[in-house]
Each structure stands twice: as structure tokens, then as C-alpha cells.
Amino acid sequence: MKYDRQAFVIALLIGALSGCAQQTVEQGLLTNTDADRAFLSTKIHTELAAEYFYRGQLDVAIEEVNEALKAQSNYAPAYSVMGLINMSLNENDKALSNFERAIRLAPRNSEILNNYGWFLCQRYPERIGQAIDHFVTAARDPLYATPERSYANAGVCETKRERYAEAQLFFQRSLLIQPNFPPAVIGMIEIDFQRGNLIDAKSKLTQFLQNNSSTSDGLLLAIKVEQALGNQLAVDSYIFQLQKHFPDSREAALIREGAIR
């Protein structure tokens, strides 16, 4: 399997380098240098690392990041991906070092700002204000492809420190950009739950789960809402769905550890 993965990387590199060489011929410029090849290798390995990370294959993701940094040791996105990996491994000191290095190398990279903000929000509650500043900076970048995500992340962080009015504004900004964006919808329902509007939260959440693919955070919120309403059968049903469809999620781990009762 490792051989197949390496073959895939090589194929991507050959394709990318061929395209670069063709562009060189067409433009009459010499661009297919060692530096070009190193950059392309780094970029491809970093993108593969991110893909493996989101699939939960952390060991392979680490291999890919290491390969990326061998080709180019100052590639900021690679350090950002490594930060996410170390965050998942609960190696917070390493993750903080990764993100800080990524920011030093690319202080205006909106994806890195978003990832760093999320890390600070989740692992350093005393730095939530800084995290939100990163989210807002990323979201205001006209070249950033997913500003709705940064606004939703800012809403989640404001909810964590119980600033519900500010959180609601961030979620609304997210939904203006992408209506029905799941993290923002779940965030709005979480505010209803936190404010004690259990019937509204249940109604909105039921409708959301019926019309959208289930998410681990949506199912966890459903568990909390039904627990608060005393509906044990519904609680058990949502726990079953969470453990079946998202067994490796943080939310499933919270249930297994008894952190959500």
C-alpha cells in the first residue's frame, strides 16, 4: 500500500512538472528549475497530508508532511497541517510551535490564520480573543475561499465564553455568505440550548437532521437537548447513531468517557 501511495505522488509530480515544462516552452521562459521542482513536491505532499489528516490517517499524514518539509523546509502550509495533526494527538506544545512557525512564515495566509485560531480557541481558552481576531482577519480576506467557515468558528468561540449575542452575529454573517452552512446552523441552535430554549432547539435540530447529512457535533447537540428534556429513548438513539457513524470523533469520545451525561 505504501508503494501505491508513493507511485501516486510520483504521478502527480510528473504531471505537475510536465505542465510546468510545457508552460516554459509556450512562454519562452526557463521556469523548470530545481527550486520549482522542490516547491511542487512540497505543495503536493502537503495537500496529500491534509487529505490524510481529514480521513483520520494521522500516521500517513505525518509521513507526507515530513516529505514536504524535506523538499522545502520553510513552507508555511506544511507547518499548519502539522499543527492540526499534533492538535489531534493532544500534543499541544508541538502544535503551538507548528502554528507559530507557520504564522511567522506567512502572516497573511487566511487558511493558516483560521487553523491557528481554531487551535487557540479549543486549547487555550484565555486566548479566545486572539483566536477571534485571526478568524475575522481571515474572513475579511477577499481571496479567502471559505470566509463562512471562519465566521462560524468565531461564533463557536464566542459561544464557549458565553457571549451569545456576539456569537449570533458571527453565525448570521456566516449564513449570509452560505445559507444553511451546517456549522453556523448548529451554532445558532446551540445558542438556543444554552439560553434554555429547549423546545425551539429541539424543533430546529430535528428539522436540520432530517434535511441534512448527520454530523458528529449535530448529534452531540441532539443528545444534550434530549437529555435536558428527559427523553432517554431519543438520547439512546442519538448515541447509537453517533457511535455508529462517527466512532473516532471527539464527540463520540466524550460520550464514551462520560463527559456528557
Image (cartoon, rainbow, N blue to C red):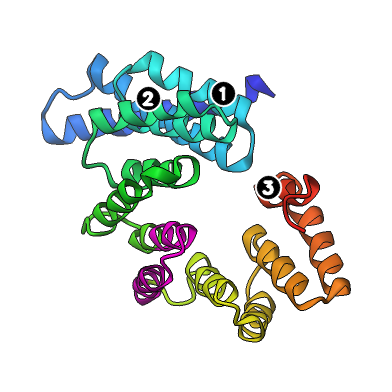
Specify start and end residues of the magenta stretch as a single range.
152-177
Number of the label disc, if any, that sits on residue 7: 1
Q: Earlier in the sequence, mark 3 or mark 2?
A: 2
Q: Nearer the viewer, residue 152 or 11?
A: 152
Task: From the image, tell me which residue sits under label 2.
Answer: 42
Examine the rendered structure and indicate whether residue 139 appears above or below residue 170. above
Secondary structure beneath disc 3? Answer: loop
Q: Earlier in the sequence, mark 3 or mark 1?
A: 1
Closest to the camera, between mark 3 and mark 1, is: 3
Label 1, residues with CA under 10 Å away: few <14, some 14-19, many ≥20: few
Q: Is residue 18 visible?
A: no
Kind of residue indicated by mark 2: Thr
Task: From the image, tell me which residue sits under label 3.
Answer: 249
Residue in view at x 43 percent, y 56 percent: 157
Secondary structure beneath disc 2? Answer: helix
Kind of residue indicated by mark 3: Ser
